[in-house]
Amino acid sequence: MTQAAASVTLAPGIKVSPDFVTEHIEMYKAFHRDPELSSHEHRTAAAIEARLDELGIEHFHSGGTGVVGLLRNGEGPVIAPRADTDGLPIAEETGLDYASTTTGTLPDGSTAPTMHGCGHDTHITNALAVAAYLTANREAWSGTVVFLFQPAEETAAGAKAMVDDGLWDRAPRPEVVLAQHVMPQPSGTFTLRPGHMASLADSWRITVRGRQAHGSQPEKSIDPIVAASAIVLRLQTIVSRELPPTTAAVVTVGTFHAGLKENIIPETAELSLNIRTPDEETRTKVLEAVRRIVNAEAAASGIGEPDIVEISRFPRLFNDAEHTERVAAAFREAFGEESIINAPLGMGSEDAGWLGDAIGAPVVFWAFGGFLAAEFEDGKAPAGNHHPAFAPDPEAALVHGTAAALSAVLSYVGR
């Protein structure tokens, strides 16, 4: 960032006032203070709508707590930048003076602390800053920008909910969907490549049903804890023995709940699984193996097939090669050749791909750094996403996140 007396340069040819930066930093802090859990982003949606009203941008609800803003400026391309809006059930430990102290309600009805522990507050603010810039600089661009403020990314429900709610029947269909995500990397750097940008992910809840008995009479029971334990151990062989060593996949048993007292063999045991795979072929193979093992271990214990319920299913996130190069060229011009990091496929997941895949539109997704370079000196690294101490630098995340989003958007609609 370079700052003159009257302007701040976000990227070459993109200047804003210092007050613009200050205003959006305060906006970011306000969103950070008040996160909401997936599909419950009512206050967040209201704040987004209020800002769109201030900017004179028409908007409508989609997918429950999603908001769609339509900014039209004459003839030209239609593009759709997306910003996710939900927080996480995490007790914040950043020590920031704008830290969250709010709570939310989990699907089981329990209350949990909430935090923007994945940076979606940054994404909202970046998108609103882009909207403000485009509104104030209509001479610099032409076309239509469809702002997608998407709820429930963390549960893989939000993008699909918007599509199922008739998103692309009410909004112009874009020639490309653009999305970005703040990550623990130095500001001014971007992770971008064609092809798969995230893993597919499936979460299942498995209930093993046995027969309850007194702990002193195990012969009268069918112990679901033993059966479930055998399932847990056997599942570990899928990646190590059924997939090639070069194929990345993860099978995690995240929870195991059974019983209420040490001298009672319970009737049920419940597991929750998270399965991450790099492509549809591997996904099918791993999920079939999970189901086979679960049913076989239950049969070996003399009980019927366990109940398997899908909790969430993340779609692919596939970057179109041609459009990825277009965005990458904009980043190279704005931030330099060395700004782009071509990192290997990680095992994180995203549902943004569904917004484009649902209508056959290409998608470009990238990660941007929201932390100061000094935080990476001497082998140090800041806390990562989903950590209670996750705290992007507000100015770095705002300036570089907004600059990246604007550079990408203007590579399509800029004059």
Image (tube, rainbow, N blue to C red):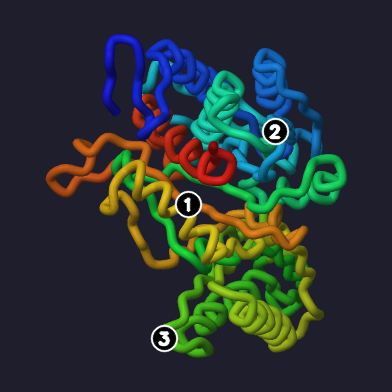
- Which element carries disc 1, helix, strand or loop? helix
Determine if residue 5 is in view: yes
Q: Residue 314: which quarter of the image?
A: bottom right
Disc 2 + disc 3, Cβ < 8 Å: no
Quarter location, residue 316: bottom right
Location of mark 1 (residue): 327
Residue 3: x percent and y percent? 28, 19
Kindly report the distance in space between the C-alpha atoms of the residues bearing marks 2 and 3.
41 Å
Query: Which residue type does callout 3 highlight?
Result: Pro
Cα–Cα gap, marks 1 and 3: 33 Å
Q: Which mark is residue 105?
A: 2
Amino acid type shown at disc 1: Val
- Closer to the chain start, of discs 1 and 3, is 3
From what the image shows, is residue 15 above or below residue 188?
Answer: above
Mark 3, residue position: 245
Disc 2 crowd, CA 10 A, few/some/many (<14, 14-19, 20+): some
Whether residue 301 is visible here, answered yes or no, is no
- The amino acid type, in three-letter code, at marker 2 is Thr
| Number of on-image labels | 3
N-terminal-most mark, 2 or 3: 2
Classify residue 390 as left or right of residue 259: left
Q: Which of the two labelled residues, at mark 1 and mark 2, occupies the earlier sequence position?
A: 2
Q: Position of residue 26 (x, y in %)?
A: 47, 15
